Image (cartoon, grey):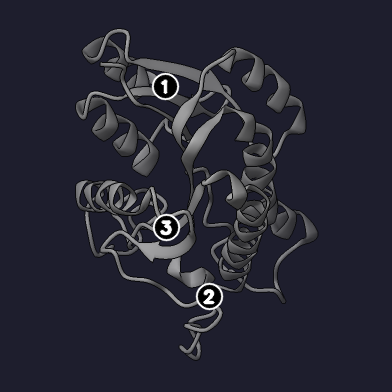
């Protein structure tokens, strides 16, 4: 029986690494990307544990010059799922008043424009009826932004923008039977989720990863665009 195949963009650490390991355990073929010039020892260890099932490639989603080499390295592969994980928290202050042009550009390029642009280039590699997943956040929900004083302006704006770009992609590919999922992973104990240990998160990586995989399996044939979390709760746009 032919293995199912997933492409995970942003897999060298945190949730991306956890997702790669979990899908390998399920018997899938995984193509995992990482940032150039970064520590990939954890991915190499996975490759040793799952020989022949894990391939890797480099890309920084903010750099357009990286797209063509990645696409070329994927060759004629076709994927059942493409999961855009790459993202950042941005500056700690998270303030429009304090942010420099460079800070705002970085978070929007990394969290919204970069993943959406790359996803557009990868669409020919998504199998008919396949599923495109974006790592979103409940902070990207405009309707749920009802907490005075929380702030998080830059992060919220980047994830709301990602949700809109994901919807634009869905509208262009929906006639092919594809599903698009914008997933909130929960507040997870990763370096990003804890701000490098400065705050305490709510759930561990395993809980988030297992939840997301279960949700994707449940909805990957819905032929819809859903804004959903790891516990299968639907979020308002």
Nearer mark to the viewer, of 1 and 2: 2
Residue 3 location (% of width, % of height)? 31, 20
- The picture quadrant where one finds residue 92 is bottom right
Percent x, y for residue 91?
59, 60
How many numbered dots are placed on residues in this image? 3
Rounded to the nearest angstrom, the CA distance separating label 1 from label 3 is 25 Å
**Residue picked out by circle 2:** 237
- Residue in view at x 50 percent, y 28 percent: 34
How packed mark 1 is, by other alpha carbons closer than 10 Å (few <14, some 14-19, many 20 or more), is some
Distance in Å between CA atoms under marks 1 and 2 = 35 Å
Q: Is residue 235 visible?
A: yes
Relative to residue 34, is residue 188 depicted above or below? below
| Residue on which disc 1 sits | 40
Q: Residue at x 60, y 74 (%)?
A: 153
Horizontal arrangement in the rendering, residue 103 relative to residue 8 (left or right): right
Sort mark 2 into few (<14), some (14-19) or many (20+) by Cα contacts within 10 Å: some
- Considering depth in this image, is 178 or 55 the residue closer to the camera? 178
């Amino acid at each position: 029986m032919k293995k199912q195949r997933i492409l995970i963009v942003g897999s060298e650490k945190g949730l991306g690494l956890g997702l790669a390991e979990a899908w390998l355990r399920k018997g899938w073929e995984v193509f995992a990307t990482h940032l150039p010039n970064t520590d990939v020892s954890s991915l190499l260890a996975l490759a040793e544990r799952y020989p022949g099932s894990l391939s890797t490639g480099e890309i920084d989603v903010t750099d357009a010059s990286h797209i063509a080499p990645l696409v070329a390295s994927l060759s004629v592969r076709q994927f059942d799922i493409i999961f855009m994980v790459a993202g950042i928290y941005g500056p700690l202050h998270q303030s429009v008043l304090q942010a420099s042009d460079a800070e705002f550009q970085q978070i929007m390029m990394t969290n919204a424009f970069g993943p959406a642009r790359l996803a557009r280039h990868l669409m020919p590699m998504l199998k008919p009826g396949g599923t495109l997943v974006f790592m979103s956040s409940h902070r990207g929900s405009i309707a749920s932004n009802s907490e005075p004083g929380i702030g998080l302006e830059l992060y919220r704006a980047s994830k709301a923008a990602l949700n809109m770009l994901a919807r634009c992609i869905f509208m262009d590919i929906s006639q092919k039977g594809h599903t698009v999922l914008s997933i909130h992973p929960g507040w997870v104990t990763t370096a990003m989720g804890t701000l490098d240990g400065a705050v305490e998160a709510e759930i561990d990586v395993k809980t988030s990863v297992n939840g997301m995989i279960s949700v994707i399996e449940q909805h990957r044939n819905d032929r819809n665009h859903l804004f959903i979390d790891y516990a299968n709760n639907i979020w308002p746009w």
